[in-house]
Amino acid sequence: MMTTSNALFTTPFDHNTDFTELADNCQRYCEALVEETDPARKIALCGRLASTLALLRPMLLEPIPEHLQERLTVDVFPEPEPAFHAESDQLCRYCEEITQLLIAGVLSPESARVMGDLLFELTGYFAGQLTAPRWLRTEAGVALLG
């Protein structure tokens, strides 16, 4: 029987995977990373995260594919975003660098725990930004948010 954790290691993804799915994967890897106690599995999760971030980064400056626009369109104006304002490419880079530090094993156990927690928070925010609505449906048509 495959556990959710094992599925994180075996579920395929590539350059054709939608950026929203890759963002969700980043969040799942970090959630599992925070809970994982086995060092080898932690490194494997970091490796999956690093691969996903590397695939995601070039997609960040591309236009949103038409087939995803409906998913990112809402009928009600969303709540305001948190005060942290970093561009998606910066956030991706931050997550990549922290992931590489964790993979390298150069941090003390306490620092690795703190950086893992930071990575968890950053990837959650990053995934939320990537999957947030971009358009608002109005009586006059669809309007770009922001």
Image (cartoon, helix red, strand yellow):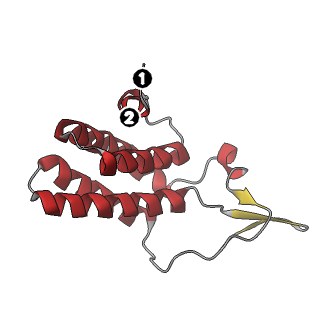
Residue furthest bottom as drawn = 83
**In the rendering, at what x and y percent does residue 5 appear?**
38, 34
Which residue appears at 38% of the width and 63% of the height?
A: 122
Q: Residue at x 42, y 72 (%)?
A: 86
- Amino acid type of disc 2? Ser
44 horizontally vs 73: left or right: left
Residue 35 in percent (x, y) is at 32, 48
Say which residue label 2 marks. 5
The residue lying at 37 percent from left, 29 percent from top is 6
Residue 127 point in image, percent of width and height: 48, 56
Say which of 110 and 89 sits in front. Answer: 110
Measured as percent of width and height from the top left, residue 90 is found at 36, 66
Residue under the image location 44 percent in, 77 percent down = 84
Q: Secondary structure at mark 2?
A: helix
At mark 1, the secondary structure is: loop
Residue tagged 1:
2
Query: In which quadrant is the N terminus drawn?
Result: top left
Q: Left or right: 115 with respect to 62?
A: left
Amino acid on which disc 1 is placed: Met
The one of 84 and 68 positioned closer to us in this rendering: 84
